[in-house]
Image (spheres, rainbow, N blue to C red):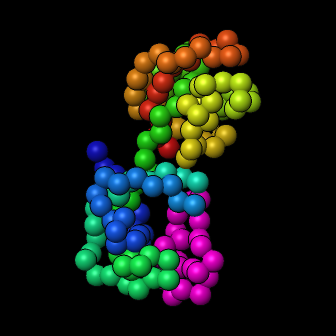
Amino acid sequence: MELNTTITLIGVRLAKVGSEFIFKGPAPECEDCRFKNSCMNLSPGRKYRIVNIRTTTTHSCDVHDEGVQAVEIVESPTISAIESKKAFKGSKIVFEPPTCKKSECTMYDLCHPIGLEFGDKCTISDVIGGAPDECVKGLSLKIVELTR
């Protein structure tokens, strides 16, 4: 499988193959940094996984105490609950979480996973199984792995 990798900079202590993180956007200290275009080339709110350490060269950083280094990343697959009638491995879907309130449902975090937004085009890479709890809206749900 060919991975669509992106090169970015990440804190030396965080640079481990297999580590996942959610990019939250730039810190105020990044505004005047000469490397900000190399660090800030990701989409805020998206989940990424480090697949390769690109170099052992480090660069000083006002945010990371041991500096930053180049890594190759890919967007991580996301586990989500979707309606059973749409849950077929290999299917392409437009992500639309159900409209419900967080306080009323134990499934909220699975139906509204971090890293996916309403309208994202995804592929169902795996159907994991049935939902662990009942949907308060009465929907029949399956747990799936989604890739963008």
- Looking at the picture, tell me which residue is in the foreground, 144 or 21: 21
Left or right, residue 43 beside residue 20: right
Left or right, residue 76 beside residue 52: right
**Residue 110 screen position, x and y as percent:** 55, 31
Whether residue 70 is visible to the viewer of this picture, yes or no, is no
From what the image shows, is residue 39 above or below residue 16?
Answer: below
Res. 45 image quadrant: bottom right
**Residue 128 screen position, x and y as percent:** 40, 23
- Looking at the picture, tell me which residue is in the foreground, 6 or 23: 23
**Residue 69 screen position, x and y as percent:** 35, 75
Say if the magenta span includes residue 127.
no
Question: Which residue range is magenta in the image?
Answer: 25-44
Question: What residue sits 25% from the left and 77% below the top?
Answer: 56
- Looking at the picture, tell me which residue is in the foreground, 102 or 84: 102
Res. 96 image quadrant: top right
Question: What residue sits 35% from the left and 54% below the top?
Answer: 19
Say if the magenta span includes residue 31.
yes
**The N terminus: image quadrant:** top left
Whether residue 146 is visible to the viewer of this picture, yes or no, is yes
Question: What residue sits 47% from the left and 16% below the top?
Answer: 130
Question: What residue sits 36% from the left and 79% below the top?
Answer: 66
**Residue 99 screen position, x and y as percent:** 74, 28
